[in-house]
Amino acid sequence: MENVKVIIWGLGAMGGGMADLLLKKKGVDIVGAVGRGSKIGKSMYDYIKTERGDRPDVIIGSPEDVIKKGAADVVLTCTDSFTKTAFDRLKFVLEQGINVVSSAEEMAYPMAQEPELAKQLDEIAKANGVSIIGTGINPGLIMDLLVVTMTGCCEEVEHIVSRRVNSLSPFGPAVMVEQGIGITEQEFIDGVKSGHLSGHVGFHESISMIADAIGWKVEKITQTMEPILTDVDRKSPYGFAKAGNAAGCAMKGYGYVDGELKIEMDHPQQIEPEQVGVQTGDYVIIKGTPNINMVNSPEVPGGIGTIAMCVNMIPHIINARPGLYTMIDLPVPRVIMGDMRDLIHPEAKIVK
Amino acid sequence: MENVKVIIWGLGAMGGGMADLLLKKKGVDIVGAVGRGSKIGKSMYDYIKTERGDRPDVIIGSPEDVIKKGAADVVLTCTDSFTKTAFDRLKFVLEQGINVVSSAEEMAYPMAQEPELAKQLDEIAKANGVSIIGTGINPGLIMDLLVVTMTGCCEEVEHIVSRRVNSLSPFGPAVMVEQGIGITEQEFIDGVKSGHLSGHVGFHESISMIADAIGWKVEKITQTMEPILTDVDRKSPYGFAKAGNAAGCAMKGYGYVDGELKIEMDHPQQIEPEQVGVQTGDYVIIKGTPNINMVNSPEVPGGIGTIAMCVNMIPHIINARPGLYTMIDLPVPRVIMGDMRDLIHPEAKIVK
C-alpha cells in the first residue's frame, strides 16, 4: 500500500506541529502544504521545527494548486475556530474528493451552533464519497468525549461537571491577545462586550455533544467569561500580567435540561498558575450511579493535545464511510506507534 | 419503532443486575430469560430485585425455548468468564440471527487467547447478519479502553501503567472463593498452582487490546498472583479474613514489546481496603508526550460498572455491521438517559 498522503492547510502553531509529528511517523507522507500571502512558494520546512534533511521539499501553495483530486488521502485544515469561516475551505477540500480533519473548535460538533452548515457538510461529503471530522484536545476529548466515555460505566447520570484548569504559558502571542492576558479589568469587560476577546471556543459544542450522546435534550446553553485578576506580576514566554490586571480568562458554561442545570463546564485558563498555587488538571465529576471523580493532573497541554488528536484521527476518518462525523460517532482516538498504513482499510485509501 | 427487545441468558448477579437496569430504561423490553436447572419455568422476577408489579411476566426457559429467530434484537449472555466455555452458547445465539453482548472477560478481546475461536465467531456472526461484542468494566473500559483513549491525545507513548485498586466488599460468596478471601497463605499458593483461584481474568485481553490499538507488537505477556495478607481481621458482608490470612488477591500483568516491558497492569483486589488505609481508585499512567497521570477515586465499582457497560453497548452492537467487535472498534459507550429506540438505526432493528 502507498504511504498515507496528507496535505496540511495552515502552518501556524497547530498545522506546523502536525507536520512535525507526521514527519516522525511511519507509513505517512506530507505531500502538500497550503498557505497564503508571502508563504506561497516557500518551503514548508521554513515554517516548522523539523529540518528538511534529505527529504523531498514541500513547497507551500494556494489551495487550488495543492488540493486536487487524488492528491492526498486527507487534508488537515488548521485555519479557523468557527464553522462559518471554515466552511468554504472545508467544502473546497471535500469537493476535490479528499477526507478532512479540521482543528476548528466549532467543527468538533458543528450541529450545536451551525446545524444548517453541518447538514450541508454532511451532504457534500456524501456526494463526494469522503468524510470529515473536527477534533482537538478541547473540544474533542477532555471536556466532552472523555466525559461521555465515563458515563458509559454509569447506570444513571444526574449531573455532570467538566473542569479544565490549564496553563496558557506555553502559548504564543495570538493566544495572549485572544485570552486578554495583561489587560486591565475594564479592558477585559469591554473586550467581552465587543466580542474582541474570544476566550475558549467550544462550550456549546461540548455540552451539545455530551447531551446528544446520552439522550438529554438541552433546551438552553449559557456561558460567562470573567478575567482572572492576578495579585502578583506574572510572566510567561509570550505573556505578561502586571499585578491587578488579567492573567487569564475564566469561562463557565451551563447546559439546562427540563429547566434544570445538568451540565456544567468550568474552564479557567491563565499564565503561570503555579506561581499562585493553582494546580492544573482535567476533571470529570459525574453525579450518578456510580459517581465518577476523575482527575488528570497536570492537564493535557492544549497544543500537543490538539496536534496529537488531529493526527491520530487520520486513519479513522479515512476509513469512515462518507459523511460528517463527530468524536462520539467513531472509535476512540489512539496514538499511532506503528505504521499508519496498517490502520487503513485498503478500499478506503484514495491514493492507491 | 418497536421497543428494543432483549433476552438475558444467565440471571446471576450480573445478568440479574442488567435486568433491573433495563426495567428502569425507556424504549426497551426484556422479552425472555434463559436459565437452567430449577430456575426453568419460574419467573425472572423471582431472581432479580425489581418487583414485577403489573408488567407481563417473563418465564425462565431453556435456550431452545427462548432464543428463536426474530425473538429479540440482542441477547445479553452472562454465563461465563472464558471464550472457550462460552463459545457454544454464543454460536447458538448468533445462529438464531440475534446480536450478542457477552460479559465473559475473555470475550472483551478474544483474539488475545483464543484467536481461532474469535475468527469463528466473526465468521458465524457475518454468516448470520448479526454482530457480537464482549464488554464489562474490566476488561472493557478501565484497564484498556480508557487507556487507549488517553493515548489519543499523545504524540508518542513510551510506557503504560494501568492500575486498578478496588474493593471486593460489595461482592458475593462466589467472588470470595475465586479471589481466595480468608484462606491461608499456603492455601492461596496451592490454589494458584492448581488453578482453583481464578483471580482477575483479563490481563491478556487488556494488554493485547492496548497494544493492538496503538500499534505495538506484543511478543510476551506474563502475570503474577499474590495473596494480600492482612495484619488485622477484616469482615465484609460475604467475606472474612482473619489476621494473617488473605484479604485479597494482588495481580500484576506485563506486556513486552521488542524485549522491553512496555505495558504494566497492577490490580490488587481486597475486602475492606479502607480498614487498612488503602485508597481505592482507577489509574492511567502514561509516560509519553505528554505524560498522563489520571485517577478516578474511588474506583468504579465492578458490579455496577459491568452491568452498565453491557446495557449501554446494546445500541452500538445492534447498529454495527455484521461481525465480531471489540471496544476499540465501536464508538465510546455512553449512559442511556433517553429512549433506547432513538439510538437504533431502523434498518438494524431485528424485531421491527
Image (cartoon, coloured by chain):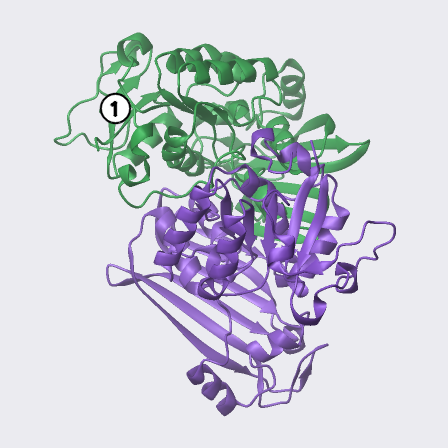
Chain colours: A green, B purple
Residue at 38 percent across and 47 percent down: it is B213
Q: Residue at x 46, y 86 (%)?
A: B189
Identify the image quadrant of residue B225: bottom left
Q: Secondary structure at mark 1?
A: loop
Picture quarter with the N terminus of chain B = top right
Query: Residue A113's x, y, as percent?
Result: 62, 19
Residue at the farthest front position:
B65
Q: Residue at x 66, y 47 (%)?
A: B6
Quadrant for the C terminus of chain B in the image: top right
Instruction: Residue at 26%, 41% (x, y): give it.
Output: A339
Identify the residue under disc 1.
A351
Q: Chain of mark 1?
A: A
The answer to whether residue B290 of the structure is visible from this angle is: no
Judged left or right of residue B23, residue B96 is left
**Camera-side residue of B89 and A92:** B89
Residue closer to the observer: A30 or B134: B134
Q: Position of residue A324 (x, y in %)?
A: 49, 23
**Up-down: is A266 above or below A178?**
below
